[in-house]
Image (spheres, helix red, strand yellow):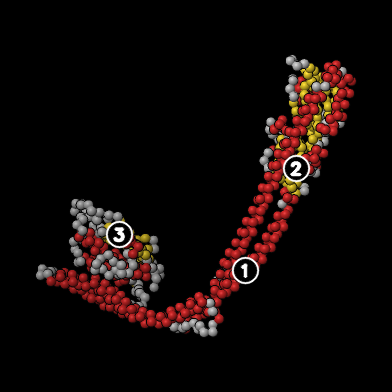
């Protein structure tokens, strides 16, 4: 049995699926919302830490600037620098380096003469990148402007402040430059880490110079220097959220990944670790809820389908025995304790009571309906032969009729009487399927005979025969095909007559000269591959677009005196012989019926 073949299974699976989807959606929504809030909080904390670092850097640079200015204004230092003698200047550099070591973490003091030559240097940092006097900060100070910058060294970054050493107030003379450098190293990074609760990384020239993270992460950390947006990166200790900030105003004016920067990182794995416990709890609760919903869904499904199963069993017995009056026993039936189920069973029993009454009434109506349909069929099938007999009798009543015409009229009457006899026989076995008597037949001759047999109805109509001379005999039931063609040609003549009664000279409402007027009806035969095509075209009133789908339906007619069986009988005959019949409405020029019949024996249906 298929999984969804049972109503119980379908209700159970639908209810369980709905519960599972709802619970899963709720768990996912809560988990997703909690994670998003935690992520947002993590990023907000990182941005706040970045603002704190900016403030600390600005304060640090301000203090460095103040101290550098105070030292540069010392008269004794100015007098020593003015001598241009390095041994004289060197003691001042060492003394100030010791004084500023504690408050500014100043590991470097550089004194430069007015020509850019280094007079003295004190500190435990070795600056090896090029000639020190050519550094841009010193050149700016020698030009009279204070300048700050960042000098990389082996274990970190030096934040330097260079001020000019001047004498005079109105037109000061630049005697040299004083550079004070403070270390941005691992120790300062640890200090910033405690203040911001974030890991700190100092970078200059696109390289990591100092960091509170392991040295193995430096290559990956360098990729964070390309943008100032909040980023996520995976390191050895887990996943981190990172933010890049410039190292002071001078660094903020620079662009690119080589600008001096500080990276703030917070462990995403540690900060969101509490979510694992929440998600685990949600998962457990969700699974318990799904289990409870599944059990409840099955119970509800059984409650709904148990009465239906009882009714289904009774209906199955009704189908097997044919007893449509069988009822459902309600007494002592546990399946019908539910009020809705009991109402359903009671309604079913009421329905079976009504079935017996309806069967009796339906049998009576069916007999009357069958009698009406039989009368319609007889009236339609007899009318055409009677019209031909009536036309033949009119010919015999003419005083000037020739002997040949009398003979032809008597022959037609004899044929139509035989046809009436066959109609009576067809009516007697009306309930049996159509049986065909196949034999070779000349379709061209059959079409000519049909045209001649229906000509007496209205001899004023012009009919043209376009038969294919290459068309030989085919195996078919000539008499049945003749009946179908008579019905089709009779409909065509009625359509032409209706057009004439409307007063229009042509089907499209235009008047044409009689010599150029096309025929009212055209009959055409064409030999095709393994088939033969018969076409009947008329210049009648045509078929309305809304009537096209129903033209072959039994009892459908647009004539007041029509029975609506002509084309239906023709369709049954043609399709019974394995052929096809279609009607095409030609706008303004009438209609065309095409018949395709198999031309080889054995291709038809019996």
Nearest to N terminus: mark 3 or mark 2: 2
Callout 3 touching callout 1 (CB < 8 Å): no
Q: Which residue occupies 44% across, 83% down?
A: 325
Q: What number is the disc on residue 544? A: 3
C-alpha gap between disc 3 and disc 1 = 59 Å
Q: Is residue 277 above or below residue 319?
A: above
Image check: 223 left or right of 186? left
Residue wearing tag 1: 294
* 34 vs 551, nearest the viewer: 34
Q: How many marks?
A: 3
C-alpha gap between disc 3 and disc 2 = 87 Å
Q: Which residue occupies 26% across, 59% down?
A: 541
Residue wearing tag 2: 196
Looking at the rendered image, the disc whose residue lies closer to the viewer, 3 or 2, is 2
Q: Position of residue 555 (x, y in %)?
A: 31, 69
Instruction: Indicate the secondary structure of the residue bearing disc 3.
Output: loop
Instruction: Indicate the secondary structure of the residue bearing disc 1.
Output: helix
Nearest to N terminus: mark 2 or mark 1: 2
Image check: 464 left or right of 233? left
Q: Residue furthest left?
A: 399
C-alpha gap between disc 2 and disc 1 = 50 Å
Quarter location, residue 449: bottom left
């Amino acid at each position: 049995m298929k999984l969804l073949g049972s109503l119980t299974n379908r209700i159970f699976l639908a209810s369980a699926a709905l519960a599972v989807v709802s619970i899963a959606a709720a768990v996912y929504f809560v988990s997703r919302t909690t994670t998003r809030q935690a992520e947002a909080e993590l990023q907000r904390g990182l941005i706040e830490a970045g603002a704190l670092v900016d403030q600390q850097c600005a304060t640090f640079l301000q203090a460095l600037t103040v101290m550098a200015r105070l030292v540069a204004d010392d008269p004794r230092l100015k007098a020593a620098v003015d001598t241009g003698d390095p041994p004289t200047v060197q003691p001042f550099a060492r003394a100030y380096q010791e004084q500023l070591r504690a408050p500014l973490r100043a590991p470097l003091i550089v004194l430069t003469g007015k020509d850019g030559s280094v007079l003295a240097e004190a500190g435990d940092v070795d600056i090896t990148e090029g000639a020190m006097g050519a550094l841009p900060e010193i050149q700016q100070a020698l030009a009279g402007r204070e300048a700050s910058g960042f000098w990389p060294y082996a274990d970190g970054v030096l934040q330097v402040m260079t001020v000019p050493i001047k004498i005079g107030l109105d037109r000061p003379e630049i005697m040299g430059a004083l550079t004070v450098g403070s270390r941005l190293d691992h120790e300062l990074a640890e200090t910033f880490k405690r203040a911001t609760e974030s890991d700190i990384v100092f970078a200059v020239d696109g390289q990591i110079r100092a960091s509170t993270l392991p040295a193995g992460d430096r290559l990956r950390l360098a990729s964070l220097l390309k943008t100032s947006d909040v980023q996520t990166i995976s390191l050895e200790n887990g996943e981190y959220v990172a933010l890049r900030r410039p190292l002071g105003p001078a660094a903020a004016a620079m662009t690119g990944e080589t600008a001096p920067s500080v990276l703030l990182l917070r462990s995403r794995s540690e900060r969101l670790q509490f979510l694992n416990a929440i998600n685990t709890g949600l998962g457990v609760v969700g699974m318990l809820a799904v289990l409870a919903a599944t059990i409840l869904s099955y119970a509800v499904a059984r409650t709904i389908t148990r009465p239906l199963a009882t009714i289904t069993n009774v209906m199955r017995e009704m189908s097997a025995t044919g007893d449509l009056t069988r009822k459902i026993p309600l007494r002592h039936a546990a399946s019908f304790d539910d009020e809705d189920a009991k109402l359903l069973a009671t309604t079913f029993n009421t329905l079976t009571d009504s079935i017996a009454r309806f069967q009796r009434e339906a049998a009576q109506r069916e007999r009357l309906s069958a009698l009406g349909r039989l009368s319609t069929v007889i009236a339609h099938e007899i009318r055409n032969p009677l019209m031909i007999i009536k036309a033949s009798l009119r010919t015999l009543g003419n005083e000037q009729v020739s002997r040949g015409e009398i003979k032809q009229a008597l022959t037609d009457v004899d044929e139509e009487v035989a046809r009436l006899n066959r109609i009576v026989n067809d009516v007697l076995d009306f309930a049996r399927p159509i049986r065909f008597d196949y034999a070779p037949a000349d379709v061209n001759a059959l079409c000519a005979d049909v045209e001649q047999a229906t000509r007496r109805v209205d001899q004023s109509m012009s009919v043209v025969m376009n038969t294919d001379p290459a068309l030989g005999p085919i195996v078919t039931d000539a008499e049945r095909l003749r009946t179908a063609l008579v019905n089709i040609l009779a409909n065509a003549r009625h359509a032409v007559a209706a057009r004439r009664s409307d007063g229009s000279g042509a089907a499209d409402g235009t008047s044409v000269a009689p010599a150029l007027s096309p025929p009212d009806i055209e009959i055409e035969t064409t030999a095709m591959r393994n088939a033969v095509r018969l076409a009947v075209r008329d210049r009648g009133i045509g078929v309305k677009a809304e009537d096209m789908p129903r033209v072959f339906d039994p009892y459908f007619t647009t004539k007041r005196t029509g029975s609506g069986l002509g084309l239906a009988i023709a369709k049954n005959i043609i399709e019974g012989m394995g052929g096809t019949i279609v009607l095409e409405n030609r706008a303004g020029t009438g209609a065309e019926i095409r018949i395709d019949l198999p031309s080889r024996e054995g291709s038809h249906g019996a």
